[in-house]
Amino acid sequence: MKTAMQSIKEMVDVNTVVGDAVETNDGSVIIPISQVACGFAAGGGEYDLSPQSKNDTLPFAGGSGAGVSVKPIGFLVVRMNDVRLISTAGNHLAERMVDIAPQFMDKLEGILRRNKGDGDLDDTIY
């Protein structure tokens, strides 16, 4: 059991959950984020092979097993003044719309201000 636990400890470390950062050409830093799940089981027992065994010690049988699952859940993208989590699951269109909504509102506000500043009453958005 000790050997199995040491093996699990070696497989699951902080770099498995939060991966190594990668820097891109534009200065952005991308950090992979994963979900890690571990399972461990052990069991054993002593068994008498024959009903007329005169041996005082019974044969021992035992075993152990472990499993580790690493599932990527997203990427943390760090830019100059912006930090975003890009998920690998979910509704990407809805997430993207929420992300760009402030930029869209800023552009719309700029267009409306420009149109009113020119004396133009036309609210056409280009």
Image: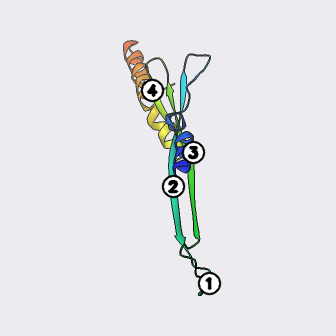
Q: Amino acid at mark 4?
A: Val
- Residue mark closest to the camera, 1 vs 3: 1
| Label ID, residue 83 | 4
Q: Is residue 59 visible?
A: yes
Using the numbered discs, state the Cα–Cα distance from disc 2 to disc 1 in whole angstroms.
Answer: 35 Å
| Label ID, residue 72 | none
Q: Report the number of discs.
A: 4
First of labels 4, 2 by sequence position = 2
Using the numbered discs, state the Cα–Cα distance from disc 4 to disc 2 in whole angstroms.
Answer: 33 Å
Q: Nearer the viewer, residue 93 or 126?
A: 93
* Label 3 secondary element: helix
Using the numbered discs, state the Cα–Cα distance from disc 3 to disc 4 in whole angstroms.
Answer: 35 Å
Q: Is residue 123 visible?
A: no
Q: Amino acid at mark 3?
A: Ser
Residue denoted by label 2: 39
Q: Nearer the viewer, residue 115 or 79?
A: 79
Q: Amino acid at mark 2?
A: Gly
First of labels 1, 4 by sequence position = 1
Using the numbered discs, state the Cα–Cα distance from disc 1 to disc 4 in whole angstroms.
Answer: 68 Å
* Label 1 secondary element: loop
Mark 2 residue crowding within 10 angstroms, few (<14) / some (14–19) / many (20+)? few
Residue 111: image location, x then y, percent:
43, 20
